[in-house]
């Protein structure tokens, strides 16, 4: 178990571990359809964060990356039904559960994790669209990359 998650119950721990994937799904569905590049980008960014995060957050990403990440992403996404908008709404609801969880955690870690999720959202938003890197983040994604469903810490 990750040190920072030790005071959380099993459901809360799982919510924390799934949060990066939910962020990716939220952003991927924002423009009406999740494209394969966005699903692949979720995995890429999570794996990159195992060594690019310079705080305790990298341990969560490492655990996630070392436990059949591709299957986990496809399983969570595959469980969703309905339109992209409905899938995005479910992802948003899942992410809003972090607000209550963060209240139970070390505030520094919670803030670092939220910031990390934001940077993940930006990277997934850049995965599809745009020409030569211009306009890659569309309007719908731009409205969500700040993760308004998760309170600022």
Image (cartoon, rainbow, N blue to C red):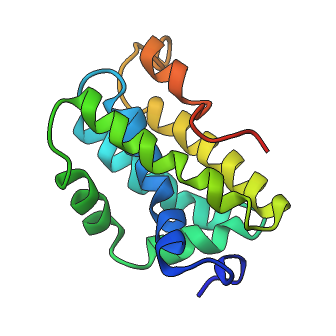
Left or right for 86, reference 67: left
* 32 to 27, vertically: above or below: above
Q: Nearer the viewer, residue 94 or 41?
A: 94
The answer to whether residue 34 of the structure is visible from this angle is no
* 27 to 96, vertically: above or below: above
What is the x, y in percent for residue 2? Answer: 63, 82
Which image quarter is the C terminus in?
top right
* Residue visible at 58% across and 35% down in the picture: 147
* 62 to 45, vertically: above or below: below
* Residue visible at 71% across and 46% down in the picture: 115
Using the rendered view, name the quadrant where residue 16 is placed.
bottom right
What is the x, y in percent for residue 40? Answer: 32, 49
Using the rendered view, name the quadrant where residue 51 is placed.
bottom right
* Residue visible at 44% across and 78% down in the picture: 66
* Residue visible at 52% across and 77% down in the picture: 63
What is the x, y in percent for residue 90? Answer: 34, 42
Q: From this viewpoint, which residue is outermost toward the right?
A: 108
Q: Nearer the viewer, residue 41 or 107?
A: 107
Q: Give the total of numbered labels.
A: 0
Which image quarter is the N terminus in?
bottom right
Left or right for 68, reference 46: left
What is the x, y in percent for residue 68? Answer: 33, 75
The answer to whether residue 55 of the structure is visible from this angle is yes
């Amino acid at each position: 178990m990750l040190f920072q998650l030790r005071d959380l119950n099993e459901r809360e721990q799982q919510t924390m571990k799934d949060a990066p994937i939910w962020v990716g799904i939220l952003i991927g569905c924002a423009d009406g359809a999740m494209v394969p590049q966005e699903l692949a980008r979720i995995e890429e960014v999570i794996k990159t964060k195992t060594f690019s995060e310079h705080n305790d957050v990298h341990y969560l990403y490492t655990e996630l990356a070392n436990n059949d990440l591709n299957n986990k992403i496809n399983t969570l996404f595959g469980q969703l039904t309905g339109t992209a908008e409905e899938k995005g709404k479910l992802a948003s609801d899942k992410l809003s559960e972090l607000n209550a969880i963060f209240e139970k955690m070390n505030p520094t870690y919670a803030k670092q994790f939220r910031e990390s999720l934001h940077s993940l959202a930006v990277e997934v938003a850049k995965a599809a669209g745009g020409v030569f890197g211009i306009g890659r983040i569309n309007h719908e994604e731009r409205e969500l990359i700040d993760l308004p469903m998760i309170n600022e810490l």
